[in-house]
Amino acid sequence: MLKACQPKRSNNFGTYKWHLAWTIDVTKREARHRSGLVYEFSSGYQCDVQPPLGGRCPCSAWHGQLQGGLSSLPEGYREQAATRLWLEASTLFSDLAIWSCQDCTISTIGDNYYMIQHKLWKRVHPNYVGMLCLGCLEVRLGRPLIKADFIKAPVNYMNPVVAAILNS
């Protein structure tokens, strides 16, 4: 579990330290505010819900939806506060989950960062935005990855797993 206690870029959050009120758990796909507000996140473009009840994260790879806690906010301030809190939750979750696999939530940095053929990516990941680890990519593809799946990009040769496939 990641506690959003340090801003990613110090100028982003100003001097109010609002990010300290949130606990972001990428593995559980959840953002919890100290007020009791809870948002759950899933991958994709599901746009049926709008703020403050949820919506898309700034990175467009995740969709969040309010799961509870709205009644804990003051009555006359509820809509305005919930909208602001949605923006906070989606920004923090987006910053922390941007490199996470959309199926299993492991980090795609390092041995899980690669580039495949555009048509293949569009077929296995129709939302197009977001990341998949190599294992989840193979599951969605329904077969092991082969040399022809990858494009000629330096990142593929820096990744030891992909480099082994390319050199086989």
Image (cartoon, rainbow, N blue to C red):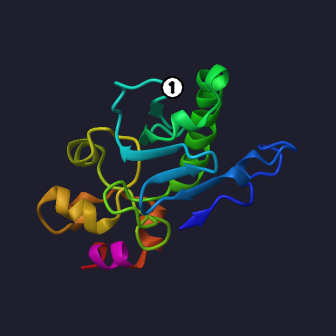
User: Total of numbered circles in the picture?
Assistant: 1
Q: Is residue 154 above or below residue 161?
A: above
* Residue appearing at x 30%, y 72% in the figure: 166
Q: Position of residue 83 (x, y in %)?
A: 59, 27
Tell me which corner region of the image, top left, top right, bottom left or bottom right, holds residue 29: bottom left
Chief SS of the magenta region: helix
Which residue range is magenta in the image?
161-165
- 143 on left or right of 82: left
- 88 on left or right of 1: right
Tell me which corner region of the image, top left, top right, bottom left or bottom right, holds residue 90: top right
Using the image as rendered, state which of residue 40 and residue 58 is in the foreground: 40
Identify the amino acid type marked 1: Pro
* Residue appearing at x 43%, y 71% in the figure: 157
* Residue appearing at x 52%, y 27% in the figure: 52
- 157 on left or right of 3: left
Tell me which corner region of the image, top left, top right, bottom left or bottom right, holds residue 159: bottom left
Task: Return the residue at label 1.
Answer: 51
Using the image as rendered, state which of residue 60 and residue 26 is in the foreground: 26
The residue at the far right in this view is 15
Q: Is residue 82 magenta?
A: no
The residue at the far left in this view is 142
* Residue appearing at x 82%, y 51% in the figure: 10
Which corner quadrant holds the C terminus? bottom left
Q: Position of residue 63 (x, y in %)?
A: 41, 39
The local crowd at label 1, few if under 14, some if 14 to 19, many if 20 or more residues have their Cα within 10 Å, is: some
Q: Secondary structure at mark 1?
A: loop
Q: Position of residue 103 (x, y in %)?
A: 31, 57
